[in-house]
Image (cartoon, rainbow, N blue to C red):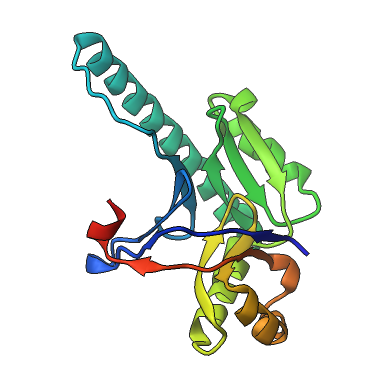
Amino acid sequence: MKRKTVTYSVITLALLGVAGISIVYGNGVLRNDGPQYRDIGIPSATFSIPSAVEEQSDVTKAMMDQKRAEEMNKLMDIVKQLAPESDGGSYVDESGSIVIQVASKSNPDLEKKLLDASEQPNKVNINYVKYSESELEESYKIINSKKDLGIYMSIVDIKKNRITVYISENELEKHRADITNAVPEDMIDWYVGELRVVDQAGAI
């Protein structure tokens, strides 16, 4: 069983405008931007030094990010056309490589088509996973439809091919069987700890 015990000092639920959810804990932020999330480090201080070099660097990076996003969308269109049931989602990893998640044991034909279609095949990784994105989303809906399981929050984590479930130790002991009867336990990434809810101003 995959389980992490975490002490949460502060949690901020940004619910206004259904803009997503930000959880502040330790030295990082876990932001829910839909089916995926990203970890954002929080520096101890933020410094702004305007310069032409930095501005040009930001523009270049934005153009590169846009190009990678367009290629990722193009490759995912191929997955959706040729193997929609195997669509496990996608993301760009820390090295800038596009990672395509394929929910099957092996699909060499699809892999070849994806690499052939890429402008930078050396920057594309095919990762075979157990669950498709639609399976994760369906289980996520099941978990969130049950309001009496003591779950603080759950998030679909495309990268880990899991659903991250935030819950206290006490509630996990009481409701673990109910949760794992609803969805496969190997689909769950447990985060166990106590959370304190504060308003947005209190988290700053």
Q: Which of the pair 164/168 is nearer the observer? A: 168
36 vs 132, left or right, is left
Dividing the picture into quarters, in which one does residue 190 lie? Answer: bottom right
202 vs 32, left or right, is left
Q: Is residue 10 above or below residue 28?
A: below
94 vs 43, left or right, is right
Name the residue rendered at 61%, 32% in the picture. Answer: 124
Q: Which of the pair 184/21 is nearer the observer? A: 21
Q: Which of the pair 23/31 is nearer the observer? A: 23
Q: Is residue 14 above or below residue 116?
A: below
Residue 27: x and y in percent read 46, 43
Name the residue rendered at 60%, 27% in the picture. Answer: 123
Q: Which of the pair 169/29 is nearer the observer? A: 169
Residue 93: x and y in percent read 56, 36
Residue 49: x and y in percent read 22, 17
Residue 48: x and y in percent read 22, 23
14 vs 105, left or right, is left
